[in-house]
Image (cartoon, rainbow, N blue to C red):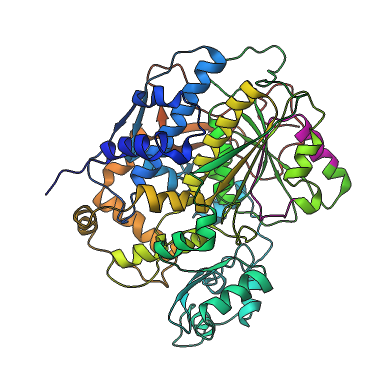
Amino acid sequence: MSTYSVPAEAFRLLKDGLIDNPLHSSAPPEVREVYNLVEYQGSNDPSVPINWRFAESISAIKGSQACMVNVLLKKKYGISPQKVIINTDHACLIFMSYALSQIDPDGKKITVYNFEEFNKLFPSQMRDPHYRSPHNSACTNIYKTRDGRFYHIHGSLDATQTQAALGIPHVYDVKPGDTVHSIYAEKVAQYDASTLDKLMNDEYRQAGTICQSTEEYLSSEHGKANAHVGLYEVHHIPNPSQKSTWWTMPEGTQPDPSRPLFGLKVVDLTRIIAAPTIGRELAELGASVMRITSPNVSDVQGLNFDLGWGKWSTHLDLKQEGDREKLRALIKECDIVIEGYRPGAMKKWGFGKEDILNMIEGREKGIIYVHENCYGWNGPLSYRSGWQQISDAHCGVSLEYGCAMGHEEAVTPIFPNSDYCTGVAGAIGAIQAIIERGEKGGSFVVDVALNYYSQWLVKTCGTYSLEVWEKVWNKHGRPVFHHKDDMLISMPVGFGLLMKNTPSLFNPSFFETRDNKAIGASVKTVKPIVNFPDGAVKLRFNVGCRPNGVDQPRWPADLRTEIVA
């Protein structure tokens, strides 16, 4: 059998798939001078039983992020580029991290799955009391249509509209002999895929997609409209009155290259995984992030436990003019706005892209507006809402995973890999915009999308060879999932297989325990993936994660303030 090495392939992917990729030619040219400082370590053989090269993908993207940080160190601080070490086994944990963290690791060992204990510290903000019911969970899944295609419907955070589109009650007692999936399978089978696609997206404005092959996506009108984009796209908005600048340091503090983004202020208008990951990645580098949530909008607190590190959290109800004015005040003082709601959602409250650019038009320094969606920002489907599973299905990732397991079915991959990778990619785009603002002035818009990552995975990263895939699949006993097996089914199985067959993936050195003063408890969680061994850069967070609505909507004078009272 030929020799395969995940670390070697990750480095090759960093160089060929990102640094030298023509789709990333807008990156600072200095990245080509520093990528050789990235060293990959880890197991040669893949660990995760998925045919797509997830380990190589996240490792290469984190390497690209490290390169961008090295360019920032040189340009802002005059620091020579630093050596970087990335362990590819460790890197895999980033797309599992929300399930691996523990509160009180030496005592109760509370995880997101210990609902009663966890909710005492992170109270639920789900408005639908039936959100976790098996019936409503089955609303997010892949089903077969009348014309033999597979279609992914999605219940989002409230399944009522998707259920209404299909004529399914929100509360439903499963009939004897049926499964929770039966009623959805029966209803979806009454539609041709194209008809169902229009019903969901255009009539009911719900997320849903035909499960395409990779070839179908790449050759489609929408795929072609976004084919010119790599992992992200940066747009410069020149303004002669906004000169080149970095950011304003808090009074009494000095720039500190060990925390290269300290002093940078970020407004975080996001939820779930992909867009919140952007803010967490910036916070890891020292940025101060104020996350805005509404007390009247559902949010998954278990994800905030993972993605809320380094962020304050304040409640604002944008239906109230007083709260909209508070948000304007936060934005007028910040450097970056991250927005991750469905396209157009923030525009109706006066916080769309143009609104924010106009808001700071007369300011001496420009702003960086980072927005993330599912389908990408070009083409006929850019208006649609979507999630990780939708992107996986739309770009062909799900169908190819099912085929690799020996059947012609679309199957959602075990872990939310595309979510986390999209978030890291968005942070790289934001850092590039920071560097460019420091040289050119003006404002910047950074386009980020789940499909941008997914199409890069398909076109550039790819799958394992049959030989390598068979080896990792055999190692785990050749598990087979089917289209009806959503992530609530496949993910626990995946974790069990990894813990049994590749326990080295959960090496204790990949974890750390943090004293989280925001909740008054210690938390064991995955360490930052990128390691600067010479100590010039120290990746950590200014404040701990916390439930929503804890902080006041203002920037504190001391950016290390744990709770903004």
The residue under the point 59% across, 33% down is 310
Question: What stretch of residues is rendered in magenta?
Answer: 325-346
As drawn, the residue found furthest toward the left would be 1
Q: Is residue 169 above or below residue 70?
A: below
The answer to which image quadrant residue 550 occupies is top right
Percent across and percent down for residue 377 are 61, 51
Q: Which residue sits at x=66%, y=13%? A: 253
Left or right placement of residue 419 versus residue 489 in this view:
right
Locate the C terminus and report the quarter of the image it occupies: top right
Identify which residue is drawn at 43% across, 33% down.
Answer: 64
Q: Position of residue 314 (x, y in %)?
A: 73, 41
**Residue 170 seen anywhere in this rendered image of the structure:** no
Side of 479 where 123 appears, left or right: right
Q: Is residue 366 magenta?
A: no
Which x, y percent locates residue 362?
82, 29
Please tell me whether residue 196 is drawn above or below residue 224 in the rendered image. Answer: below
Question: Can residue 369 be seen?
Answer: yes
Q: Viewer-proximal residue, 357 or 169?
A: 357
Viewer-proximal residue among 113 and 222: 222
